[in-house]
Amino acid sequence: MAVGAQFLASPVTDPQVITLGRQHGLVSVPGAFTPAELINAHKAGAFGLGFVASLFEPMDMTKHRLDAIAARAKRITEKVREFGAQRARSSQVTTA
């Protein structure tokens, strides 16, 4: 986080990691396999379940193309932030 992280990707659903990310304004993308893991991640405030695989393409990993991974992460993070902003605006309209 101190060097500019914008998201947290994890191979497991850990509510403490998700909470830490939310406290620091980071997008949290945990790995989840079972329905219980999916619901627990959602309840903890995770976003992007299932995006982990689309973030780390096998060929990029093999060829150490960190630039491609970083660019993909930036696009995903921007989309998540746009979605959050739209959601916040729509909730303000419905409560006003």
Image: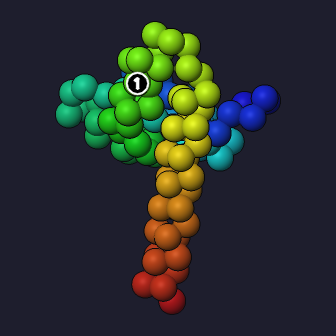
Write the residue at 51% across / 89% down: 96
Q: What element carries label 1?
A: loop
Characterize the local packing of mark 1: few (<14), some (14-19) or many (20 or more) Cα atoms within 10 angstroms: some
**In the image, residue 32 above or below residue 63:** below
Q: Classify residue 4 as left or right of residue 34.
A: right
Write the residue at 20% across / 34% down: 35
- Answer whether residue 79 is visible to the viewer in this image: yes
Question: Which residue is the extreme one toward the bottom?
Answer: 96
Q: Depth check: give the residue in front, 65 or 28.
A: 65
Question: Which residue is the extreme one toward the right?
Answer: 2
According to the image, label 1 marks what residue?
57
Q: How far across and how far down the image is residue 75, in percent?
A: 53, 47
Write the residue at 38% across / 33% down: 54
Question: Which residue is the extreme one toward the top?
Answer: 62
User: Quarter-wise, where is residue 59 in the image?
Assistant: top left
Q: Looking at the image, what colour scheme do you see?
A: rainbow
The amino acid beneath tag 1 is: Glu
Q: How far across and how far down the image is residue 72, in percent?
A: 51, 38
User: Quarter-wise, where is residue 73 in the image?
Assistant: top right
Q: How far across and how far down the image is residue 71, in percent?
A: 58, 37
User: Quarter-wise, where is residue 30 in the image?
Assistant: top left
Q: Depth check: give the residue in front, 69 or 5.
A: 69
Q: Depth check: give the residue in front, 82 or 46.
A: 82
Q: Depth check: give the residue in front, 60 or 43.
A: 60
Image quadrant holding the N terminus, namely top right
**In the image, residue 64 above or below residue 37:** above
**In the image, residue 39 above or below residue 90:** above
